[in-house]
Image (cartoon, rainbow, N blue to C red):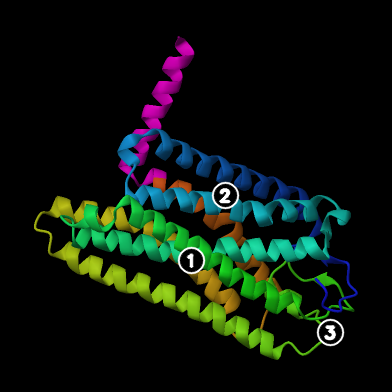
Amino acid sequence: MSNGSFVTEFILTGLPHAPALDAPLFGAFLVIYVLTVLGNLLILLVIRVDSHLHTPMYSFLINLSFIDMWLSTVTVPKMLMTLVSPSGRAISFHSCVAQLYFFHFLGSTECFLYTVMSCDRYLAISYPLRYTRMMSGRACALLAIGTWLSGSLHSAVQTILTFHLPYCGPNRIQHYFCDAPPILKLACADTSANEMVIFVDIGIVASGCFLLIVLSYVSIVCSILRIRTSEGRRRAFQTCASHCIVVLCFFVPCVVIYLRPGSRDVVDGAVAVFYTVLTPLLNPVVYTLRNKEVKKAVLKLRDKVAHSQEE
């Protein structure tokens, strides 16, 4: 990227912590990462093989599991390297560009996908008789493709705004992965315009998506309250509860990081752990432990595997 930069690599300072915690943190994050990948792979496999789960909601869940698996992979392995070796803290300039792009690509795609999923739940609960026609296979595919394309465009804007500036002096990034706010602090030029555009861009996307999600769930609650049977209301609330939990865990940390004035390295690092390490793990945990259909499919898959091994 020809932007007049003299820096060929950056040094990631990693998470702020006492050196004695290197091994415990490495072990904890490694276990969480492995569980995240395996859990999301399990969801992908179960939905793929069980024909009863070939519905719009689960097609979007496939996309969400795929995103969470790779969102964690973009950041966590490098963080683990910073914990075990001083040389693991180095990241080349172009690798840093790639990491920032894919992080924002997957993160913004997930943001758009949460919005689509909330609209899908609204249609399923408010218009059950017309739902199948409105959310056809073609409509689901177009919505999914739209989220990925929108995420790619949004990430390209963030990456270009960050790396078209010259970097010619300090190269220590006060973070455990390459993200726009800590990188802009190292630029050898005025970054106020870039910071403002990034703030407005992320603000419009995040607030717009969150507003649509809130409106969807307000409408969903109104529809649920009109259901006559208590069992029907309970099942409808249960279906949406898991989505609400994951959405809040995703949006609240993003607001803390990107939509507040100033930047605090320690706070940003701790909050970023939540949505890069813990939130991707919440997806398989919440959707499998709180969803009877998925639990049935998992048990059916387990019995099928056990039966094949006996033969």
Residue 280: give x, y in percent of width and height. 54, 54
Between the residue at mark 2 and the residue at mark 3, the CA separation in whole angstroms equals 35 Å
Callout 2, which amino acid?
Met
Residue 264: name its quadrant.
bottom right
Residue carrying label 2:
69
Q: Do the residues labelled 2 and 3 touch (CB within 8 Å)?
A: no
Residue 191: give x, y in percent of width and height. 73, 87
Q: Are marks 3 and 1 in contact (CB under 8 Å)?
A: no
Indicate the quadrant containing the C terminus: top left, top right, bottom left or bottom right: top left
- Element under disc 1: helix
Residue carrying label 3:
188
Q: Do the residues labelled 2 and 1 touch (CB within 8 Å)?
A: no
| Residue range of the region highlighted in magenta in the rendering | 288-311
Residue 287 appears anywhere in the view: yes
Residue 61, numbered label: none
Q: Does the magenta stretch include residue 308?
A: yes
- Element under disc 3: loop
Residue 66: give x, y in percent of width and height. 52, 49
Looking at the image, residue 282 sits to the left or right of residue 34; the answer is left
Q: Is residue 10 magenta?
A: no
Position of 126 relative to 309 (above/below): below
Q: How many marks?
A: 3
Residue 16 appears anywhere in the view: no
Residue carrying label 1:
111
What residue is rendered at 71% in x and 77% in y? 162
